[in-house]
Amino acid sequence: MKIVQLKLITGRGIECGLGIVLLLAGFTKIADLEFFWRALEGAHVFSESRARAIILLLPPLEVYLGFALLLNFERKLTTMLSTGLCACFVTYNLLVAMKGGVAHCGCFGTLNEPIFDDPLIQSIIILAMPVSAMILDRNAGGQLKDLDRS
């Protein structure tokens, strides 16, 4: 197997992994919106109107991006949007940390047992997923065209 193929397969695997993470996050939020609301409201980062907008828009966006990543739909655009979303998660955690708190945002609903004590570390690792997938694809010359449906 050529190194280019290995990079492409690894990048695609990372995209699928992120797709599963986003689907899990979106569906668990949808299943228990009240839990997500309490977690988001308790951080005191957003006004009530912005928090409501986030609660209405974020879960469907996560589900859409998750399915799009798994189904390889508009791969490059979806990976870039996922990167932006993950960067927002890191920013949110930084804002909470600057206020002296720890963000237990209800990211995975009632399954929200963080892997790490600091959710910022978890968010940075999740951000590294789409970034590394884009780097692998770029280093392979963007040759995933045969898998692209766009």
Image (spheres, rainbow, N blue to C red):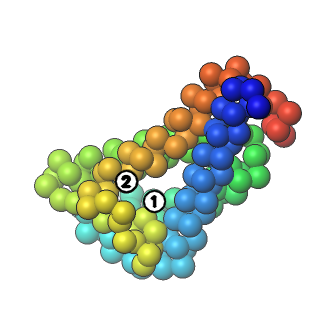
- Residue at the image point whose x is 55% and y is 40% from the top: 130
The label shown at residue 122 is 2
Report the number of numbered marks: 2
* Relative image position of residue 43 (x, y in whole percent): 25, 63
Other residues around mark 2 within 10 Å, as few (<14) / some (14–19) / many (≥20): some
Amino acid type shown at disc 2: Gln
Q: Is residue 74 above or below residue 48?
A: above
Residue reaching furthest to the left:
100
Instruction: Give the residue displayed 71% in from the left and 26% down from the top.
Output: 4
Q: Quadrant of the N terminus?
A: top right
Q: Is residue 80 visible?
A: no
Is the C terminus in the top left, top right, bottom left or bottom right quadrant? top right
Who comes first in sequence, dot 2 or dot 1?
Answer: 1
Residue farthest to the front, as pictured = 1
CA distance for labels 2 and 1:
20 Å
Label 1 SS: helix
Q: Residue 52: percent from the left, percent from the top? A: 42, 65
Q: Which residue is mark 1?
A: 54
Give percent across and percent down for residue 6: 69, 34
From the viewer's side, name the closer residue of 4 and 94.
4
Which residue is nearer to you in this view: 14 or 3?
Answer: 3
Res. 63 mark = none
Crowding at dot 1, Cα within 10 Å, few <14 / some 14-19 / many 20+, comes out as some
Residue at 26 percent across and 69 percent down: it is 42
Specify whether residue 111 is in view: yes
Quadrant in the rendering for residue 46? bottom left
Q: Amino acid at mark 1?
A: Ile
Q: Quadrant of residue 64?
A: bottom right
Percent across and percent down for residue 123 are 39, 50
| In this rendering, the label closer to the viewer, 2 or 1 | 2
* Quarter of the view holding residue 2: top right
